[in-house]
């Protein structure tokens, strides 16, 4: 268990640069201060979850990572490169992908076209990308001609994940993957997350459902009204008293 | 941060985050900090900022009373002559009244009503048909004015109902088309009824009766002025009261977030259509007054140009601000007079013009930026003058500015003879340059500002002096674009935070 | 001369007979093809930005003047300095490219700064742009009707050049070369547009952006560029319509953009706003209605009849002919 600002420079002089790093990020909406001095890292191949209640700044963090919201202070770097002032499409091109909150599929387009959109910066997707996604989600191959908007919630979740994986991301961002899904589907969906992670993709999962996400994550951060209040290995966070009270309900 | 951690299973320290953590009290503090944001910003802007803050924080009722007191005294000191009272006083008041009606639709209900001038025109034609010798009806104003309002309300209700599905967008296009159809109908179609064209075609309907209430005729300009002032006050008070009531709150709610308002069981569309109809009634009333004042109803007075002027008034005053309409109408009407051909007081206007430019530059910060712009503008002017003189010949540079000011002849390019469309291209060029400057930032803006300012001077000396008619209207069109880009809430409106 | 319009109309229908009806139908289809092209621009921009681009009609107007500029630069219709087929192709090329650039410029300077502003702000900006373009054109052309003299193009000594030769005749009503050119060009451009939107990567990005701009940008799509391209394509179509208007109707005038824009927008609404086939169908329908109104009731009624159609559709079938019932996005 470490305090947040713990030992940034303590022993890791030789440690490799993390894949993603947010350094003292401040974000504002007009005069309202949202993220306040946020530090966050995701190492290569790591599965990190970001927990927090409503309006704690979780989604803003993801938007800051993607460049949809620009920080006023602080920096965002990816693979050691400072991308603070880079466009969203540049960042996606560097190897990020996202499964947005509520999935945000392109409803009037087919499953196939949705997948193509996922690989937009890679020429619409090579055959092996499609094969990879279809192996993971055989259903998508069956339904590739169906309009995405006509599918059920669980199927849409598969399309959204498949779409994000089309770009062969190094870092996959997931915004509330459990939201709006039946409990059984939540479990399925986290199994898939685990599977994807085991194939070597680093992930930053934003969740309110601390129990499930901590069960598969390597590390976790807890955000409250724009500030980090806890961080550490997932196993320890699960045992943390305050966290249990606040999020795990036991 | 590596996952190496010291003492596993020691959960007792309360989750104290990073070093300079504020105590829980600061959470509350953030709210008041947010609430004071406007004040803090105003304080930072010096006396002008404080004045703006004072304006924003004074209640509308106070502003209205102050306006009425000043307006009622005007005929006795500033606008003593009949002509001045007519041009400055009466027409400003009519613009104020029209602006108020439009503010209800645009500012309070958030609808884009582009047929507003048509409702204004309908009021005028209703008065013209019922109170003139055209068809031989000489109805008194106490009957005609309500009928004029009703004549405007009926088509408004139909249009509002027709556009109910996509109210925001369809209403805009439907009303714009309505405005155009109204112009065509009055001007060209002019169907025959009882032996004559019902709208008098391009000539309109002349020789209207003066406003007559219960046998009492309003003939002098002063009487009309005070009557219009009274009307405007009644309209303003009605809007003020409506805005403070449940309806006003519902308007605001449905403008800010229609979906949330709908969920709160506010009948959003019905309220919006109500605002639209109310605005049309105001337009109809003022149309009738306008027709009586100008003793004629002619369709060109209700064209899109008038609409643009009204929008300029509302936007200058700020969306949703009732008091802002008064300011906007005064500014626009006075600037119209300012843009009249420079027959009267040309050198005064010139000093005012250049003074304004220098004042704007001087307010730029830091000071060396202002210096760069000033020096750049002056230098750029001499350079352009020299280049034009060398390349195009002296006929291009030896024109004389109107009314002396010989010091300008070596700086501003003024062709001696009329060089085709030279001045008009200049003007369009200026407008494009202004839009470019508005969209640039930082030093790019500084660099672009010097030639733009010089172009402004060129246009001032070459164009605005001679042909202000169309050019003034273009100015207002551009003002809409630039203002929307810089301050979408209007000049005196308050900004709001948009959460992405 | 009756006093009631209705009797006049009935008289007129009798007087013109079948031949007259064919003539009006022909005129309506040709005019409607132009409306369709402009309506497509409205519907595309509305689809992607939910913005009524009031300035679109004025882009069309600028297109007619650009075509005219090329015509004059090469000697005018009566004495062209280059053969007339390349000349016409050049007019199309310049006008389409130029209009496209104007459209992109409008988007860049008037609409892009307002992406996150309240919805009414870009509408007012659009109104300002339309007003600015129209009045600037008025100022620069001194309110003149500039004559294309399209009928003289390519002729040996004056009137009745190849553009006015009949291609075929239906019931003694001739269909001329220029009419065929207008209709075929419109069809070809629309086909190209449909191919772009449904078959290319850009088209898919356009559809994705118009459905959910933020999600599209999360896929790495540069949505600003996609929006620019949408304005470009829409304006290119308007530019083509501008040249064809000049060749077919014969003149360029600063005010036509406003009127054409209104009618083309009506076409987009009648067809179902946001629907490409709807815009095409609506355009032809409005053109035919206007032609019949002009022929039977008189030109002074045409705008009012088209306006009546708009109101009627909004009252009876607000989704338009091919529009789907609105799904309000939350």
Image (cartoon, rainbow, N blue to C red):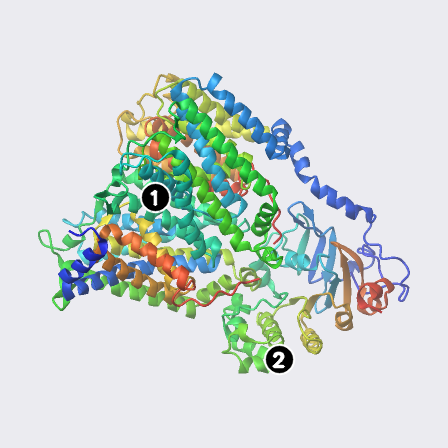
What residue is shown with label 1? C134
Which chain hosts label 1?
C
Which chain hosts label 2?
A
Q: Residue furthest front?
A: B214
Estimate the x, y position of residue A97 in percent, counting from the top left.
61, 66
Foreground of the two, C208 or B29: B29
Residue B23 seen anywhere in this rendered image of the structure: yes
The CA span between labels 1 and 2 is 57 Å
Q: Residue at x 34, y 28 (%)?
A: B462
Estimate the x, y position of residue A208 in percent, counting from the top left.
73, 65
Tags 1 and 2 both on a single chain: no
What residue is shown with label 2? A136
Number of numbered discs visible in the structure rendering: 2
Query: Callout 1: 10 Å neighbours few (<14), some, many (20+)?
Result: many
Q: Is residue C205 shown left or right of residue B386?
A: right
Residue C94 seen anywhere in this rendered image of the structure: no
Foreground of the two, C113 or A152: A152
Quarter where residue C153 is shown: bottom left
Quarter where residue B40 is shown: top right
Q: Secondary structure at mark 2?
A: helix
Point out the image quarter for the C terminus of chain B.
bottom right
Foreground of the two, A172 or C23: C23
Q: Is residue B13 shown left or right of residue A137?
A: right
Q: Is residue C17 shown left or right of residue A223?
A: left
**In the rendered image of this protein, does residue C252 appear above or below residue A46?**
above
**In the rendered image of this protein, does residue B244 appear above or below residue B61?**
below
Q: Secondary structure at mark 1?
A: helix
Q: Residue furthest left?
A: C157
Quarter where residue B29 is shown: top right
Q: Is residue C303 shown left or right of residue A190?
A: left
Estimate the x, y position of residue C323 in percent, counting from the top left.
42, 66
């Amino acid at each position: 268990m470490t305090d947040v600002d713990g030992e940034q420079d303590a022993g890791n002089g030789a440690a490799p640069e993390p894949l993603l790093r947010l350094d003292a990020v401040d974000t504002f909406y007009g005069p309202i201060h949202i993220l306040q001095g946020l530090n966050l890292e995701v190492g290569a191949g790591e599965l990190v979850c970001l927990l927090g209640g409503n309006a704690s700044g979780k989604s803003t963090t993801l938007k800051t990572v993607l460049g949809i919201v620009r920080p006023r202070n602080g920096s965002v770097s990816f693979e050691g490169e400072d991308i603070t002032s880079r466009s969203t499409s540049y960042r996606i091109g560097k190897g990020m992908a996202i499964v947005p909150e509520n999935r945000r599929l392109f409803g009037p387009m087919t499953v196939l076209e949705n997948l193509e959109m996922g690989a937009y910066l890679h020429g619409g997707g090579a055959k092996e990308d499609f094969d990879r996604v279809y192996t993971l989600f055989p259903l998508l191959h069956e339904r590739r001609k169906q309009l995405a908007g006509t599918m059920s919630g669980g199927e849409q979740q598969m399309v959204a994940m498949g779409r994000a994986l089309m770009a062969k991301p190094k870092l996959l961002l997931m915004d509330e993957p459990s939201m709006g899904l039946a409990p059984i589907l939540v479990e399925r969906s986290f199994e898939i997350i685990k599977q994807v992670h085991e194939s070597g993709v680093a992930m930053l999962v934003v969740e309110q459902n601390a129990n499930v996400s901590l069960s598969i994550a390597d590390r976790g951060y807890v955000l409250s009204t724009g500030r980090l209040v806890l961080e550490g290995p997932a196993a320890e966070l699960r045992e943390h008293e305050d966290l249990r009270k606040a999020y795990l309900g036991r | 941060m590596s996952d190496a951690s010291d003492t596993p299973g020691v959960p007792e320290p309360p989750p104290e985050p990073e070093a300079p953590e504020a105590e829980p009290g600061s959470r509350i503090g953030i709210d008041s900090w947010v609430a004071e944001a406007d004040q803090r910003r105003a304080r930072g802007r010096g006396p002008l900022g404080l004045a703006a803050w004072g304006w924003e924080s004074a209640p509308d009722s106070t502003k209205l009373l102050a306006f009425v007191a000043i307006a009622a005294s005007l005929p006795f000191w500033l606008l003593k002559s009949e002509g001045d009272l007519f041009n400055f006083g009466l027409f400003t008041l009519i613009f104020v009244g029209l602006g108020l009606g439009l503010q209800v639709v645009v500012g309070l209900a958030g609808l884009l009503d582009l047929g507003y001038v048509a409702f204004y025109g309908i009021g005028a034609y209703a008065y013209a048909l019922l109170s003139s010798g055209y068809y031989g009806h000489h109805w008194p104003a106490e009957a005609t004015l309500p009928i004029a309002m009703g004549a405007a309300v009926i088509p408004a209700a139909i249009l509002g109902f027709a556009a109910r599905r996509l109210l925001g967008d369809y209403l805009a296009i439907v009303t714009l088309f309505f405005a155009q159809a109204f112009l065509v109908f009055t001007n060209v179609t002019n169907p025959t009824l009882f032996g004559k064209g019902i709208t008098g075609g391009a000539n309109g309907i002349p020789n209207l009766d003066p406003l007559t209430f219960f046998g009492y005729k309003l003939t002098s300009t002063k009487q009309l002025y005070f009557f219009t002032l009274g009307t405007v006050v009644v309209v303003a008070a009605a809007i003020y009261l409506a805005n403070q009531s449940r309806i006003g709150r519902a308007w605001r709610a449905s403008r800010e977030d229609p979906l949330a308002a709908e969920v709160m069981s506010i009948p959003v569309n019905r309220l919006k259509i109500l605002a639209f109809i109310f605005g049309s009634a105001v337009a109809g009333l003022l149309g009738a007054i306008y027709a009586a004042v100008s003793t004629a109803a002619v369709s060109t007075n209700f064209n899109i140009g008038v609409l643009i002027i009204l929008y300029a008034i509302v936007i200058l005053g700020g969306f949703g601000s009732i008091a802002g309409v008064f300011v906007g109408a005064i500014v626009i009407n006075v600037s119209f007079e300012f843009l009249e051909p420079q027959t009267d007081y040309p050198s005064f206007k010139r000093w005012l013009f250049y003074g304004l430019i220098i004042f704007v530059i001087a307010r730029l910060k830091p000071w060396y930026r202002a210096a760069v712009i000033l020096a750049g503008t002056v230098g750029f002017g001499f350079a352009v003058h020299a280049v034009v003189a060398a390349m195009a010949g002296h006929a291009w540079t030896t024109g004389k500015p109107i009314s002396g000011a010989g010091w300008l002849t070596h700086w501003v390019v003024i062709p001696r003879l009329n060089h085709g469309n030279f001045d008009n291209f200049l003007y369009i060029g200026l407008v494009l340059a202004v839009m470019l400057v508005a969209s640039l930032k930082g030093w790019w803006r500084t660099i672009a500002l010097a030639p733009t300012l010089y172009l402004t001077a060129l246009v001032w000396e070459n164009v605005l002096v001679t042909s202000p008619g169309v050019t003034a209207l273009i100015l207002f069109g551009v003002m809409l674009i630039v203002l929307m880009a810089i301050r979408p809430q209007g000049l005196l409106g308050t900004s709001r935070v948009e959460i992405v | 001369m009756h006093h009631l319009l209705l009797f006049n109309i009935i008289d007129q229908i009798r007087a013109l007979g079948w031949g007259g009806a064919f003539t009006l139908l022909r005129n309506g289809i040709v005019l409607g093809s132009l409306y369709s092209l402009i309506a497509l621009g409205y519907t595309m921009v509305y689809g992607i930005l939910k913005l009524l681009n009031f300035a679109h009609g004025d882009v069309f107007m600028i297109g007619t003047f650009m075509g005219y500029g090329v015509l004059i630069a090469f000697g005018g219709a009566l004495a062209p300095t280059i053969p007339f087929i390349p000349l016409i192709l050049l007019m199309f090329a310049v006008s389409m490219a130029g209009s496209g650039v104007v459209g992109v410029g409008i988007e860049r300077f008037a609409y892009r700064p307002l992406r996150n502003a309240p919805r009414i702000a870009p509408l007012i900006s659009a109104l300002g742009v339309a007003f600015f373009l129209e009045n600037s054109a008025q100022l620069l052309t001194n309110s003149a009707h500039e004559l294309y003299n399209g009928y003289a193009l390519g002729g040996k000594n004056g009137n009745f050049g190849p553009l006015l030769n009949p291609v075929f005749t239906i019931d003694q009503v001739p269909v001329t070369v220029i009419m065929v050119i207008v209709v075929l060009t419109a069809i070809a451009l629309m086909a190209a547009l449909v191919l772009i939107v449904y078959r290319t990567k850009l088209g898919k990005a356009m559809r994705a952006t118009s459905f959910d701009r933020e999600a599209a940008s999360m896929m790495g799509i540069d949505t600003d560029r996609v929006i620019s391209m949408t304005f470009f394509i829409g304006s290119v179509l308007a530019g083509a319509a501008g040249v064809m208007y000049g060749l077919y109707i014969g003149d360029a005038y600063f005010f036509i953009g406003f009127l054409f824009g209104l009618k083309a927008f009506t076409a987009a609404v009648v067809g179902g706003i946001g629907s490409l086939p709807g815009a095409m169908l609506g355009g032809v329908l409005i053109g035919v209605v206007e032609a019949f109104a002009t022929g039977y009731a008189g030109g002074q009624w045409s705008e009012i009849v088209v306006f009546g159609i708009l109101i009627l559709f909004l009252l009876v079938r607000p989704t338009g002919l091919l529009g789907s019932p609105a799904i309000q996005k939350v």
